[in-house]
């Protein structure tokens, strides 16, 4: 057997589960660390109304959609929602910080970009909708 020593089906399952964990972790840490008001204030400073309400909406979406993604339910819809969320984050936050997230930059787009591609692969691989 050759690298990656797993079937394509299992690799796609691991990708879907990993994406779910990443998004849910962001939401849970945001709640646990109490950073929702700060993030809400940032969104308001960027011109969006009701920043804290928006952040709670994002947080609830990330947890709920993460659970659905992990369960393999509504994978295409959930993936599309996450892509929209990531694209909005690129426009509002990451684009002005450049491409690189670490080492060569600070908070750029590369992480969001690869998550978008992973979500597209996950949505394309979903067998529950044709």
Image: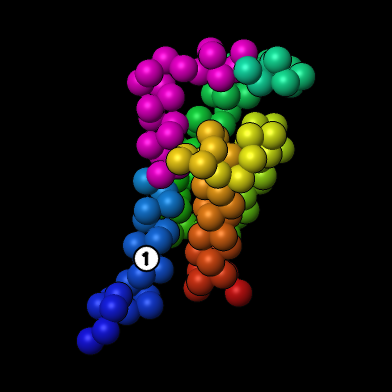
x, y (%) of residue 104?
51, 42
- Residue 6 vs residue 98, the one in the foreground: 98
Residue to which mark 1 is pinned? 13
Q: How is the image coloured?
A: rainbow
Image-based side of 91 in relation to 118, left or right: right
Going 47% across and 57% down the picture, which residue do you hit? 73
- Residue 12 vs residue 56, the one in the foreground: 12
> Which residue in the rendered view is the most extreme toward the front?
104
Q: Quadrant of the C terminus?
A: bottom right
Count of numbered badges drawn on the protein: 1
x, y (%) of residue 41?
62, 13
In the image, is residue 27 part of the stretch drawn in magenta? yes
User: Can residue 32 be seen?
Assistant: yes
Going 55% across and 44% down the picture, which residue do you hit? 100
User: Can residue 81 be seen?
Assistant: no
x, y (%) of residue 108?
58, 40
Going 63% across and 24% down the picture, which residue do you hit? 54
In the image, is residue 127 part of the stretch drawn in magenta? no
Which residues are drawn in magenta?
Answer: 22-41
Asked if 24 appears above or below 5 in the picture, the reply is above
Q: Quadrant of the N terminus?
A: bottom left
Circle 1 sits in a helix, a strand or a loop, which is it?
A: helix
> Which residue in the rendered view is the most extreme toward the right?
47
> Which residue in the rendered view is the most extreme toward the left?
1
Image-based side of 7 in relation to 104, left or right: left
Snapshot quadrant of residue 15 = bottom left
Going 29% across and 78% down the picture, which residue do you hit? 3
Asked if 56 appears above or below 77 in the picture, the reply is above
x, y (%) of residue 74?
53, 57
- Magenta span main SS: helix
Decide: few, some or many residues near mark 1? Use Cα within 10 Å; few <14, some 14-19, many ≥20.
some
């Amino acid at each position: 057997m050759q690298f990656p020593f797993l079937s394509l089906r299992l690799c796609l399952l691991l990708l879907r589960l990993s994406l779910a964990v990443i998004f849910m972790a962001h939401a849970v840490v945001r709640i646990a660390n109490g950073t929702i008001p700060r993030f809400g204030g940032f969104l308001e400073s960027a011109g969006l109304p009701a920043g804290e309400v928006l952040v709670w909406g994002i947080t609830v979406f990330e947890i709920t959609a993460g659970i659905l993604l992990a369960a393999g339910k509504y994978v295409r819809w959930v993936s599309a929602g996450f892509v929209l969320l990531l694209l909005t984050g690129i426009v509002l936050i990451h684009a002005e910080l450049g491409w690189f997230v670490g080492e060569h930059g600070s908070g750029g787009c590369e992480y969001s970009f690869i998550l978008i591609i992973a979500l597209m692969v996950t949505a394309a691989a979903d067998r529950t909708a044709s």
